[in-house]
Image (spheres, rainbow, N blue to C red):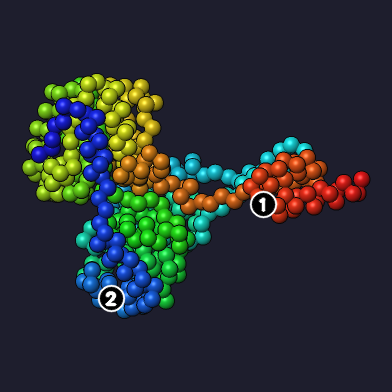
Amino acid sequence: MVRILEASAVQAVEELLARRREENREVELRVAEIIADVRAKGDEALCRYTALFDGCHLRPEELRVPPEEALAATKEVGAEFLAALEAAAENITAYHRRQLAGSWLEAGRQGLLVGQLVRPLKRVGIYIPGGRAAYPSSVLMTALPARVAGVREIVMVSPPDHRGRINPHTLAAAVRAGVTEIYRLGGAQAVAALAYGTETIRPVEKIVGPGNLYVTVAKRQVFGQVDIDMLAGPSEIAVVADGTAEPRYVAADMLSQAEHDPLARALLFTPERPLALAVREELERQLRDLPRREIAGEALARHGAIVVTRDLGEAVELADRFAPEHLELMVRDPFLWLGRITAAGAVFLGPHAPEPLGDYLAGPSHVLPTGGTARFSSPLGVETFLKKISLIACSEEALLSMAGHIAALARVEGLEAHARAVEMRTAERKNRR
């Protein structure tokens, strides 16, 4: 069961941070082989790996899901699911429309114009885990921000089951989100196909979306050929709670992430030892009838912890230091402590904002930085699918006024041609006077 740590809370967090990144050299080498094979043999390699890893034998022409098959999936799923899908899609779209940034051009001194063009990427790939599971929410959380950004071609890859089918709920979400191409394809081979292209699949400019270790390693290895959103690790939740927190809620929210993966991290930071004991009891009780109790139990035992701190301030500080994917402030006045938070993928405020609210319906994308990368990176959003182009225009008078500074800086750096490119123009101006 989950540990209670209180001898040295700071040391406990350092231990948790140190255990986060576990390199796997064998996976790195195997993924490199798969990527090289796909680059060399294209569709033939994709079909071979799909048979090997997914137990599904496809011909190259069967890799792409026909539009009519995706549309038919919307009739297979229930009305309740479609209503939930629509509600989620509306909230996600509305939230991301607020993130849109426009181009701008501004006049500077003496005829200098500077600005920025904002342009959407043309073609992006979204990876959606599949096979035995269905993640329609991840389709919405990746494709809809891309649509809001103005991306015209959204290419979805998702592993098929042994019959070659992608879950109809996933396909229905793809239709609602405006995905333009769908392929029965998963794993490192799917990432390679999106990055380099094959006879059937044209390459994309960016790959986003969560996946297993092989997918994550593949995204890292193709970065540079294409852009990626982030390197996703195991799911994480950190709850900061005081004496007002309901132990049942805290335990339920910790389990909501622990059930994802045996490697998931579920942590509680609290200065209240009675709460710590009550939450541990609740975790044991709620685990008993949880369908994924073996996965959640292993996650709690291996990577979970209840950290008892000196006071609430230390609890907030240590949670922020952990920089979790999901951070819940289950305290009397969560907005009072929000100003102390500098590193988290998403923050959930108060007892009625459980983590699953963010996973499915609130609006912000649930594709969030993990593994401590929230210290320097952001959730997937509209900006993920936009690029910025700098604009510079200059009058002859403005260039003349700045020429001396430019030349001085260029010559300090040993770049004489830079200096001459400016001085040539200013000399002509002086000669005309």
Task: Answer with the quarter of the image where residue 412 lies.
Answer: top right
Q: Is residue 283 left or right of residue 82?
A: left
Q: Judging from the image, what secondary structure is the residue with disc 2 in? A: helix
Amino acid type indicated by mark 2: Arg
Residue displayed at 26% across by 59% down: 25
Camera-side residue of 266 and 161: 266
Task: Answer with the quarter of the image where residue 325 lies.
Answer: top left
Camera-side residue of 244 and 75: 244
Q: Is residue 159 left or right of residue 203?
A: left
Residue indicated by mark 2: 48
Can residue 82 be spotted in the picture?
Answer: no
Question: How many other residues sit within 10 Å of disc 2, few (<14), some (14-19) or many (≥20)?
Answer: some
Where does the N terminus fall, quadrant-wise? top left
Q: Compared with residue 241, is residue 134 higher up or lower down, i.e. above or below?
A: below
Residue indicated by mark 1: 415
Residue 417, position in %: x, y? Answer: 71, 54
Q: Judging from the image, what secondary structure is the residue with disc 1 in? A: loop
Amino acid type indicated by mark 1: Leu
Residue 259, position in %: x, y? Answer: 18, 46
